[in-house]
Image (cartoon, rainbow, N blue to C red):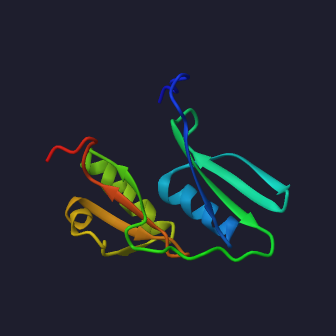
């Protein structure tokens, strides 16, 4: 993947009460690598996960002495598009092997187009077997 220097980089940040376990789960399930992290930064620990040189990454943070809020809806999703069927099936297998639990989606569109998985804190990731933009 080529990083376009004049394009914005997307970082999605989320607090967790189980930084090590969540980090390992997302590395295994999504095939991400640790891109960086920090310890004891004003009471926070964190890790950045993604694909080196990619246009996006995930940041998981843990604030000392603070329990994170649970997800507020089954519609709070991170969606990854896999147009190649074999690659999508492999990605779904990795998610299950990493400990994600397959769940029904709140929106039936995602059940038709892919599979939704829940992490150990109840947050959801959908793997869509389609391209972006969708082919209809």
Write down the quadrant of residue 90 in the picture. bottom left
Q: How many labels does the image show?
A: 0
Res 16 quadrant in image: bottom right
Image-based side of 72 in relation to 60, left or right: left
x and y, in percent, of residue 33 in the image:
60, 47
Nearest the viewer among 67 and 110 is: 67
Residue that appears at 48% across and 54% down: 30
Instruction: Name the residue located 70 percent from the left edge and 77 percent from the top edge.
Output: 67
Where in the figure is residue 69, as x and y percent of width and height? 60, 75
Q: In this view, does 100 lie above or below 133?
A: below
Q: In this view, does 42 lie above or below 97?
A: above
Q: Which of 88 and 39 is in front in this view?
A: 39
Of 25 and 108, nearer the camera is 108
Q: In this view, does 82 lie to the left or right of 122?
A: left
Check the image and name the residue furthest to the left: 136
Answer with left or right where residue 38 lies relative to residue 99: right
Q: Residue at x 47, y 30 (%)?
A: 1
105 up-or-down from 87: above or below: below
Tell whether 116 sits left or right of 42. left
Query: Residue 38: image x %, image y %?
Result: 79, 51
């Amino acid at each position: 993947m080529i990083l376009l220097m004049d394009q914005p980089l997307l970082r999605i940040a989320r607090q967790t009460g189980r930084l090590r376990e969540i980090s390992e789960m997302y590395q295994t399930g999504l095939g991400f690598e640790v891109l960086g992290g920090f310890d004891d930064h004003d009471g926070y620990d964190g890790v950045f996960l993604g694909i080196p040189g990619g246009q996006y990454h995930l940041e998981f943070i843990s604030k000392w002495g603070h329990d994170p809020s649970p997800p507020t809806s089954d519609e709070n999703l991170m969606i990854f598009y896999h147009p190649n069927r074999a690659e999508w099936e492999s990605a779904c297998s990795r998610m299950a092997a990493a400990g994600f639990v397959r769940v029904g989606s709140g929106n039936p569109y995602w059940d038709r187009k892919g599979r939704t998985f829940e992490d150990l804190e109840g947050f959801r990731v959908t793997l869509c077997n389609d391209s972006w933009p969708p082919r209809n």
